[in-house]
Image (cartoon, rainbow, N blue to C red):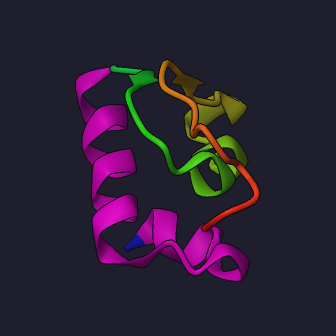
Amino acid sequence: MEIDREHADLGLGLVDASVAALAEELGLYRLATRDVRDFTAVRLRGGRSFELVVNPSNPDRS
C-alpha cells in the first residue's frame, strides 16, 4: 500500500504495487514485464529503480 500511495499519480493498482513490494522485499530488481510505463516510474528504497528485461513490442499501446 505504501508503494501504491507513493506512486498515486500512476494508478499502479494492487497487482503492480504488490509485485514491486515483493521484489523490494526479496532484493530483486530485475523484472520481466511489458508494463514499461509503470515499472520505469517506480522508485524503491534509496531511489533504486527496476531493470526491465522484457520490453513491449509496441510501447505506444497500453
Residue 56 position by quadrant: top right
The C terminus - image quarter: bottom right
The N terminus - image quarter: bottom left
Looking at the image, the residue that sits furthest to the front is 57
Residue at left 28%, top 67%?
A: 15
Q: In this picture, is 34 found above or below 12?
A: above
Position in image of residue 30 (x %, y %)? 43, 19
Residue 22 in the figure: left or right of residue 12: left
Q: In this picture, is 36 found above or below 53?
A: below
Q: Which residues are magenta?
A: 2-27
Residue at left 34%, top 20%?
A: 28
Residue 61 in the figure: left or right of residue 56: right
Position in image of residue 3 (x %, y %)? 49, 63
Q: Observer-nearest residue: 16 or 54?
A: 54
Q: Observer-nearest residue: 32 or 48?
A: 32
Residue at left 42%, top 38%?
A: 33
